[in-house]
Amino acid sequence: MELIQIKTAGDGSSPKQKLDLATVQQKLSAAQGPEYWRSLEELAGTEEFQELLHQEFPRQASEWIGGDVSRRNFLQLMSASLALAGLSGCTKMPTQAIVPYVKQPESLVLGRPQYYATAFTLGAEGMPVLVRSNEGRPTKIEGNPEHPVSKGRTDTFAQGSLLDLYDPDRTQVNLFRGETQTWGTFVSAMQAPLASQKANGGAGLRLLTRSVNSPTLAAQIKMLQQQYPQMKWVQWDPVNRSSVYAGAQMAFGQPIEARYNFANADVILTLDGDFLYSGFPGMTQYSMDWANRRDPDNKQNTRGINRMYSVESTPSVTGFKADHRLPVKPSEVEQFARALAAKLGLGGSGNVSGDGAKFLDAVAKDLQAHKGAAVVVVGEKQPPAVHALAHAINGTLGAVGQTVTYTDPLIANPVDNAASLKDLEKDINANNVDLLLILDANPVYDTPEDTDFKQLLKKVGLKVQYGLHLDETAYECDWHVSGTHYLEHWSDARAANGAMTIVQPLIAPLYGGHSPHEFLAVFTGQPDASGYDIVRNYWQGQFKGTGSFDEFWRRSIHDGFAAGTEFQPKQVKAAAANFPPTQMNQSQGVEMVVRFDPSVYDGRFANNGWLQELPKPLTKLTWDNVIVVSPKMAKDMKFPADQNAAVAEIEYRGKKLEGPVWVQVGHPDDTITLYLGYGRDRAGKTGDGHGYNAYSMWYSDEPYYSRGVKITNTGKRYEVASTQGTQDFYGRNIIRAASVAEYKKNPEFAKEMGEAPKSDDTLYPGYQYPDTGENGNPAYKWGMSIDLNRCTGCNACIIACVAENNTPVVGKEQVQRGRHMHWLRVDSYYQGSPANPVAYFEPLPCMQCENAPCELVCPVGATVHSTEGLNDMVYNRCVGTRYCSNNCPYKVRRFNFLLFQDWTTPQYKLMRNPEVTVRSRGVMEKCTYCVQRITNGRIHAEEDDRRIKDGEILTACQQVCPTNAIIFGDINTPNSLVAQLKSGPRSYGVLEDLNTRPRTTHLAAVLNPNPEITGGEPEQHS
Ligand code: SF4
Ligand code: SF4
């Protein structure tokens, strides 16, 4: 087999060993590779892989790496400052009364942050959040701990949304055909077209929105429809829930929402449902409920550890957290659902063969054995029939009322998005559209290939776009109206449980602009109405309580939600399971799925450097999208499995697209996955020019998957930037895992898998910790425990750490050199066959070693031990020798090789956490256990003359984690959670054989496999 030689970022002088899948297979069968491996390259042990590792400490490290292009790209990231050099460093608070969340004097206490409840909306879900405000500047987003869906947790997109607020590329003016206009001019200019629409009942008026989750916005649209009865409301959201609602319509005769209760679920089957990842409505609550049932040591988990099965195409974090995963082609998911329905006595039939048949038998038996405690979950990219089948299966399993309930839809007006868009297209082509209002949408970029929206807009009389960016659509419209970020305006949203959640502003609009409510009010005849009045008046009209509305309003703003407004379960019964099969083209050959990107979503976060640089789950890729294929397909097509990726050409329906190929273990054969969100040319300085545009391969009549796709190897190569190959452990036993039965038989398995030398069995001098702290109480001894069983690899902790600790964005070229600055990484490890391995996710921050190898080698004492056990960095002393990083066995130190931090863009100065030093070039940095939060906790405790309570200090990564995988606290408090976890049988220290005595330890994974599938001894299951 001929494979192209791998080109690395090294000097390229030595001949390289070729990485091929045959080597991988050979190593596996000969059991010579490490048991747990992170990438195919590592498994094969190539020289290239070793070289990649050494890039962390490259020769000529402080020199610039590339030619003009690299330099220009980097400067592009840094030069955002030029855009707004005139912006003042001062901020204005909104003029309306907003309500601080905590009970403290409402007057500002300088240096003490305040928290405000608000909501971040993405698609169908408004996520309740608390936002930290330092002197009027929003600086960090957390979940709302009082809200039953959030319970204080958020996700990657909510975390990243803070950077969007300060994005210097946001639009700052209203434009009419390129000319700056005032808001007043815009309002006046709309009067004549509106008057002519009034005359014909709005027959030529169209409003295009994404999914609308805000009740007030929906009411405004309804008002507009009443005033212009002939107008049409078009909805196009590339990531939509049309299939979910169509499936419910099939099963129940109405478009309703399924809400899952994983706390009650002993057995879970997901059919391509990635409910543990951001973007799935209710993900925070689902993750916590699921994780609590994964914890074998949790005393409250009286029903035992749950068991999860996954049937999916594109590997997802949920799929890889399943005890059993069946990779199938996209078209086979429906066949599996039909076969399962048949097995459960619902009639019909489905075609499942090979490994799938055994899997199906075992799943069907397990589900049936757990009636009333089982549930089937379906992802929104599956066709309606699969959703309908799942409803019928859940019905027959007695799941309704136990593990699933049904409620009203989360979005205001569920329609078939594709049909809605096509209807608009038809009307425009028939010259029936005189005035098109586009509300916070970007259809020129994000519509399927069969809708050429750019051309369509040429046929519209007047087109007006409201939005936050001068994006692809803004350039094609007559008017562009500058919008506001959700942290700048009043609005509302429905959380995943349907509860009304108030969106309150924390800062007056940075760039001027108006809220979506104010924009729409121009067309409902209220051009002077403020967003605050619109939202408040709507809820005043809805208020049916007995007390005063003012009190209700104030409490709702304070709490972030109105108690009692959550949706009530609906009593529905699914129809018989003879749902018509999904009509797809019958072409044979390669199938293709198009997914939203785990970092930049449908493209709306493309200009967000935090999200661009966040290593995507599983692939750990940054700054690009790729074409994902299976190892076998790669072998057959001679695609190498490395970062110097082969470029493939995709051909479908006469259109062609080129993109780099990523070989993902666990991906089904004869299938490719494409990701949306890239290939943008009007996203902004950060987001333009990365990746390919997958919308050009996506057709509205095939929203779920396509068949008969042609893929060829162009022979070209393209360097992608993945962090998966950097910071390696050279095959040491990092992951410890067992089955439930093994754990019960030998609870000490994790300890026995490694060697923990005696504490004095070392040449290190040892640190004498004081017995008492300043006030005579026992000294604090900080530590952290990370549970591999709970961690889903969702990455929220990484971006929370970035936001909290002012971590810079370094750009693609620097990531390729292994120079990303994240203080925390989440490694993926695989075990077993590349075709369908088991995966483990291991978050790894600085381990705060008691015998810290970094400390001894620092010639200037810049990294020193604290009396409470932290491995402190004294940035002022650091001279950048990097000896500490060389000597760190965990590779968790990060060095500012270049001036990564943007010191000049005024907006970014506002965004930074004032309690964390902003590091500059030539300084080593790393996880500090969020020492600023420890200090704050200490100050509060000292004010009250008490000891810091357990759980009072949450590190940023701990606070965001939707599964409670990260627990921090005082080990000297015997009943603290962290002390208990560390004394538990699953606790072990990564590389503890080196006697580094890490303060951060991990909890071994315990899986719950079904012996019918593994062929092993019977497992004790719940
Ligand atoms: S530890 Fe990090 S990656 Fe793991 S579940 Fe928590 S937030 Fe997600
Ligand atoms: S403890 Fe704080 S500094 Fe350390 S990884 Fe977590 S968030 Fe980052």
Image (cartoon, rainbow, N blue to C red):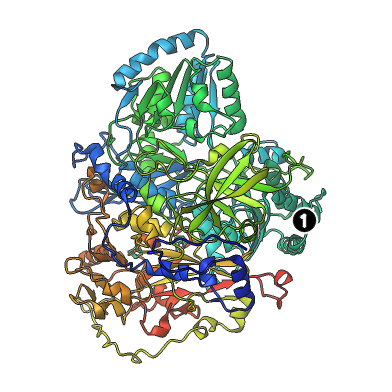
Residue pointed to by mark 1: 352
| Residue 364 at x, y percent in the picture | 75, 60
Looking at the figure, which quarter contains the C terminus? bottom right
| Residue 358 at x, y percent in the picture | 76, 64
Vertical position of residue 230 compared to residue 557: above or below: above
Q: Residues within 10 Å of mark 1 (few under 14, many from 20)?
A: many
The part of the image, by quadrant, that contains residue 960 is bottom left
Ligand 2 sits in quadrant:
bottom left
**Quick one: SS at disc 1?**
loop
| Residue 52 at x, y percent in the picture | 42, 66
Query: As rendered, which of 380 and 78 lies closer to the eye?
Result: 78
Query: Which amino acid, mark 1?
Result: Val
Vertical position of residue 701 compared to residue 878: above or below: above
Vertical position of residue 511 compared to residue 878: above or below: above
The part of the image, by quadrant, that contains residue 925 is bottom left
| Residue 333 at x, y percent in the picture | 70, 51
Looking at the figure, which quarter contains the N terminus? bottom right
Q: Is residue 18 visible?
A: yes
On the rendered structure, is 513 left or right of 227? left
Q: Residue at x 21, y 40 (%)?
A: 91
On the rendered structure, is 512 left or right of 643? left
Vertical position of residue 85 compared to residue 403: above or below: above
Q: Residue at x 54, y 71 (%)?
A: 43
